[in-house]
Structure formats: structure tokens, C-alpha cells
Amino acid sequence: MKYVFLLLTLIISSGGFGFSLAEVKGFEGGFPKGTGLDKFRIGNLGKKSNADQETQYDQSEEESSNMGNQEIQHDQSKDTSFYNQKANESSGSSKIRFRGLSGTYSSDSQEVTSSTGTIIWGKWGIGQSVFKLKTSISGDTYDIENTLIEISYTLGDEFTLTLGGRSVSNGKLTITSSDSEIYNSSNVEGSGYFSILGIEFGIFEILAGFQYTSYVFTEIKPEPIPSGWRSFKDSGGIYVTGIGLAF
């Protein structure tokens, strides 16, 4: 009986040790074969490492996709800026401007005035000026009024430089002699040039420039006319300022 009890104790002890060993080794990948517990193997750790690799691969794909999206967005921003630039250039070149300028000059012997109205569509413009001069020479008084047609070309958008030419379309000369005799002429030829600087403030423009004109009157009547009055020729320039509207 004593030996039987000792034998059972050894068997039980050896079986408990084998189970505990199986539990320790089970965390390394499963229970050892031959214990009867190998069919309860804990899952394959290799699958976890494969899952991590798949996750990393997916992330790399997402990163490459995001980089592609960023490149597309970058290209779209370039296209947008290009189209915006073209739109700004187009809007700047299609502006309509209405301008009014005037200038005066006076001295002891003469008074000069000039008034100009201009419309500009895009770059090209057309305008009309009225030039008036009253002067005295050797006791004779000269009254002159000329109308000029102007063609211009404008550079810039918010800061502009307008260059142009002008031609006298019609005019009138009245001479009052020292003897109170009156002589007239409407046969006039002349031309000139001008330049205008402009700065925009909203829809308004501040303008400043210079106008130059050379002209000659012929066929002064009535006859006979005093000696030296066969023609009247004059030239000169005047500074002008003004305001405008730009749409």
C-alpha cells in the first residue's frame, strides 16, 4: 500500500510538470507534441507578421497616391494661376476709359487754353481737343481757335502711359489790327503729338501730360491785307491735367 501511494504521487507530479511546461512553451507558438494538448495550438505568429507587411504595403500605396494627388493639385494650381493671369490680362486689355484734360497758360502778351475729351477701348483711343490762343503782337490782336483730332495708344493697366498724334481738323483766325481793321482765315493745317501719364484709384484715373501743336493759317481775308500777313504760323506746347473713369 505504501509503494502504491508513492507510485501515484510520482505519476501525478510528473503529469503536473508536463502541463506547466506545455503552458510555458504554448506562448512560443503552441503546446509540445506528445502531451495530448498539441491540437490546441495557439495561432500562427507568422500570419501576424504577414498582416504587418500587408499594412505597410497599403500605407506605401496610400502615400504614393497622396503624392500623385499633390502633384495633380499642384498642376491644377499652376493652370489656375495661368488662367487667372490670362483673365487679368484680358480684363486689362478690354477696359474702357473716359478721360477729360485741360490746361491753361497766361503771360503779359498771351493766354492759352486747351481742353480734351478722349475715349479709350483696350489700348487704342480717339479724342478731340479744342485749342485757343489770344495774343498781341506789335499792337495787333490775334484770336485763334483750333479743333484737333487725336489717335492714341495706351501702355499698362493701373499705371498707364498714353502716346498719340494729333491733327488740326479745322480752325479760325481773327486778326484785329491796330487800326481796328478785322481780318479772318479758316484755312488751317497743323499737327502735333502728346503724352499722358495715368494712375488708377479704383475706377478713377489721375492724369497729367503734355501737348504740342504746330499750325499755319493761310488765305487771310479780306484783301488787300497788310504786308507780311500772307500767312500766320505758330507752334508751342502746353501742360495738361485731368481725371478719367476706367471700367
Image (cartoon, rainbow, N blue to C red):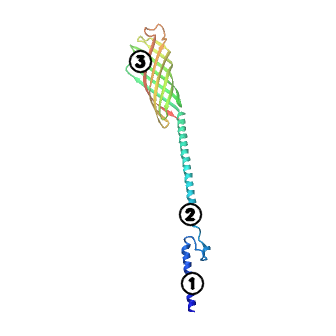
Give the spatial CA distance, label 3 vs label 1: 141 Å
Amino acid type, residue under disc 2 in the picture: Ser
**Residue 60 in which image quadrant:** bottom right
Q: Dot 2 lies on which element?
A: helix
Q: Residue at x 44, y 15 (%)?
A: 233
Q: Which residue is denoted by mark 2 in the rendering?
A: 49
Q: How many C-alpha atoms fall within 10 Å of the one at disc 2: few (<14), some, or many (≥20)?
A: few
235 or 69, which is in the foreground? Answer: 69
Amino acid type, residue under disc 3 in the picture: Thr
Q: Which residue is denoted by mark 3 in the rendering?
A: 135
Give the spatial CA distance, label 2 vs label 3: 105 Å
- Counting from the top left corner in percent of width and height, residue 72 is at 56, 47
- Circles 3 and 1, Cβ within 8 Å, touching? The answer is no
- For residue 204, above or below residue 126: below
- Which is more N-terminal, label 3 or label 2? 2
Q: Which residue is denoted by mark 1 in the rendering?
A: 12
Q: Dot 3 lies on which element?
A: strand
Q: Dot 1 lies on which element?
A: helix
23 or 239, which is in the foreground? Answer: 23
Q: How many C-alpha atoms fall within 10 Å of the one at disc 3: few (<14), some, or many (≥20)?
A: some
Q: How many C-alpha atoms fall within 10 Å of the one at disc 1: few (<14), some, or many (≥20)?
A: few
Amino acid type, residue under disc 1 in the picture: Ile
- Which is more N-terminal, label 1 or label 3? 1
